[in-house]
Image (tube, helix red, strand yellow):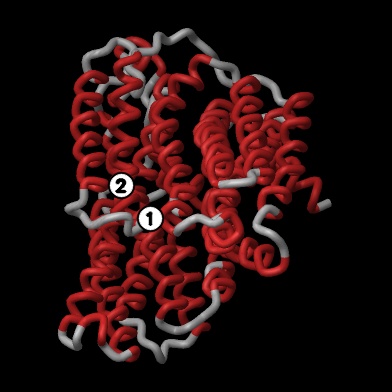
Amino acid sequence: MKNQQEEKHNEGTFGSKSNFLVVMVMILGVFVAILNETLLNVALSKIMDDIGISPSTAQWLATGYLLVIGVLIPVTAFLIQRFTTRALFLSAMGLFTLGTLAAALAPGFELLLIGRVLQASGTGLLFPLLTNVVLSVVAIEKRGSAMGTIGIVITFAPAIGPTLSGIIVEHFSWRALFYGVLPIALFVIAFAYFRLKNVTETSRPRVDVLSLLLSTCGFGGIVFGFSSAGEGHGGWGSNEVLVPITIGVISLILFIWRQLRLDEPLLDLRAFTYKVFRMSTIIMMIVMMAMFSAMMLLPIFLQNALGYSPFHAGLIMLPGGIVMGIMSPITGRLFDRFGAKWLALIGLGLVGNTLWQFAFITVSTSYLTIMVWNTLLMLGISMLMMPVMTNALNELPPKLYPHGTAIISTLQQVAGAVGTALLVTIMTNGTSKYLAQFGGAEAEPAQKVLAMMAGMKSAFLLAFALVVLAWIISMFLKRAVPPKKEEWEGQGASAH
């Protein structure tokens, strides 16, 4: 009886059983793609030993992945308007599956990198496409529940990735990470081929080649430059960091200028004329930076200062991921009833409090305490991530859905790269400054641990300050009211 009620609720949320099936098969595809994003990080040292590459070369497997996604997502608005749901989803899953197979069979670094690039090409298309499908088939008053269902995937998959990877790599070859994903990806393709229908409307927008070039150089340059700084490829003064960031910033300014002059822009920036969308995008960028601060800095501290294994460092993230998965549909339904403002304020309050606790972590802080704090952090993020995003997109006219989704997804990637680089740099500088008082590299091991704690404190306090800013912005959030049909049909995306 309960299952029948749940099925009826799902059909009611998504409009029909066929729509429900469409969304579910796409969610499974997005799940394996996002899971794959975090699977490889724990396995990098095994890959280095197996195929004989240096840490800086191996890091390209992560940087290259982020770079392709950062470059591709801005183009998704054009692709979603140009091609059918079915064609685009099958193409994206086909690229992802081909990349997975190439990576599993790779005899050396070159084919492994090509495999990762192909995987990223598919992943970059999948989430914006899924979001647009939901916006197309779900009534506005039920979008919170629908987006909450999606939230299970995008929050749970990255959280279980490091733990799952740690278990697999400890007992099997790193290639098992790719072989394990392959049958699921093939099943999704087969199911989608027979059952997936087209739900988004297509048109024939012109592609502006110069915009495409500027977008690639702009977003690609910024993501690559900041990723290089965050991963320690070079200091902030090195050419490897400065040159791509400079090219990226100049290209991005020219890209924005061109988009505002075109009748059919590659990325329609008029979405920013909507107040709720504008505020929500800033909140989500800050949340992304705060989440990355914990995901990057905690494992480093647990392994280098407290001596935990990579598996135990990854395991600490698991309860938080489970909580996010459970809470995502609940917060979706709460959003449908109460809106995003109070969920965002409570969620950001939890995130801010947790970051403050992390800033004052010591060697005597127990493993369980850190796990509880991290779980509270993830609970806070689950309360605000999807509700704030749904509220932002609800304010836009349907013609701007693909552009709004692409803008939010792109800026989240940029915020992740910038946040990681900024916080790792602050931690490194804080550590070096502390060590300088005790002989630098010659300092005692105990002093090195204290130095790392000092660096972590500086990084987490900055993340806390950013979250306080997001909390203040959230106080002014309102429930989004979509523009009337005659308004957006007659005037385009007019400013609020």
Badge 2 is on which residue?
A: 477
Dots 2 and 1: beta carbons under 8 Å? yes
Badge 1 is on which residue?
A: 344
Is 96 rendered above or below residue 435? Answer: above
Looking at the picture, tell me which residue is in the foreground, 451 or 237. Answer: 237
Looking at the picture, tell me which residue is in the foreground, 242 or 481. Answer: 242
- Point out residue 325 in the picture as x, y percentages from the top left corner: 59, 57
Which residue is at 40% across, 59% downward?
A: 291
Looking at the picture, tell me which residue is in the foreground, 462 or 495. Answer: 462
Q: Is residue 127 visible?
A: no
Identify the residue at the far front of this view: 52
Relative placement, left or right, of 413 versus 194 is left
**Amino acid type shown at disc 1:** Ala
- Point out residue 134 in the picture as x, y percentages from the top left corner: 56, 33
Relative placement, left or right, of 213 versus 58 is left
Relative placement, left or right, of 273 versus 338 is left
Which quarter of the picture shows residue 171? bottom right
Q: How far apart are marks 2 and 1 (CA)?
A: 9 Å
Disc 2 is placed on an element classified as loop
- Point out residue 170 in the picture as x, y percentages from the top left corner: 67, 69
Is 259 rendered above or below residue 159? Answer: above
**Amino acid type shown at disc 2:** Leu
Looking at the picture, tell me which residue is in the foreground, 149 or 414. Answer: 414
Identify the residue at the far right of this view: 1
Binning the other alpha carbons within 10 Å of mark 1 as few (below 14), some (14 to 19) or many (20 upward) gives many
Q: Which of marks 2 and 1 is nearer the N terminus?
A: 1
